[in-house]
Amino acid sequence: MILKDDEFGEVIVRKSPLAHGVRFSVSTSGRLAMSVPKYTSLFLAKRFLNSNRKVIREKLPVKDPREQKSRDYQKKLLMKQAKAYLPYRLEYFAKLYGYKYSKCRLSHAGTRWGSCSSNQTISLNIGLMKVPEILRDYVILHELAHLHHMDHSKAFWQEVGEHDHNYKMHEKKLKMFNPGL
Ligand SMILES: [Zn+2]
């Protein structure tokens, strides 16, 4: 449920069968989120919001409603670019170096550029579309190497180094960028 509020913009209302009271938090999009007991009406949710306005203002980093919209837009755009690029780039390098993965997932939340799960799914952060191509490629080669080494052992880095001779510098440069939106 979304509650429109003049001060906080769109407020996400999550009904939870386990919630006893009302809890406020900030969603990854910067919106205010409130979890409420299952049978809470919108009217009641609004009342909870009104009576907690001051605390929320002081304690929670809710994004400006105008900024929420521009973040949504930016995310949509990045997702579109990422979809048309990342899975193909991954496939390209996998074929080139003989890797087998099962699936490519695109992610956006969190603080990671990529990950590789034990079922061979490679996740790539859509924020990669904002970094230079050479760093993007490094992340892809890094995750591909995890298909053979599920750790950051010496053998792992050796394999990364075979495909990206400057991986140390790329790893360092990547820290100047933030995967979050
Ligand atoms: Zn890693």
Image (cartoon, grey):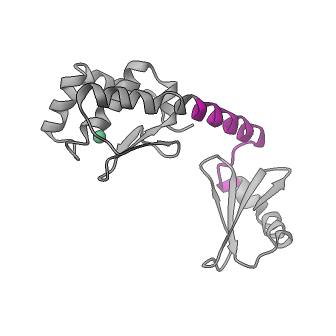
Q: Is residue 46 left or right of residue 83?
A: right
Q: Horizontally, is 86 left or right of 157 in the view? A: right
Identified at 29% across, 53% down, the residue is 118
Q: Position of residue 13 (x, y in %)?
A: 72, 63
Percent across and percent down for residue 145 are 24, 36
Q: Quadrant of the C terminus?
A: top right
- Magenta-colored stretch includes residue 162: no
| Residue 45 position within the rendered picture, expressed as x and y whole percent measured from the top left | 79, 69
Count of marks, rendered view? 0
Residue 84 at what x, y percent from top left?
53, 29
The residue at 36%/44% (across/down) is 115
Q: Residue at x 45, y 19 (%)?
A: 132
Residue situated in front as seen by the camera: 87 or 155: 87
- Given residues 137 and 112, the one toward you in this image is 137
Q: Is residue 172 above or below residue 154?
A: above
Where is 73 relative to 56, above or below?
A: above
Residue 36 location, quadrant: bottom right
- Can the viewer see residue 128 in this picture? yes
- Quarter of the image where ligand 1 sits: top left
Q: Quadrant of residue 63?
A: top right
Q: Is residue 70 magenta?
A: yes
Of 114 and 11, which appears nearest the observer? 114
Answer whether residue 22 is visible to the viewer in this image: no
- In this rendering, position of residue 15 left or right of residue 166: right
The stretch of residues the image draws in magenta is: 58-80
Against 117, is 44 above or below? below
**What secondary structure is the stretch in magenta mostly built from?**
helix
Which of the image's four quarters has the N terminus? bottom right
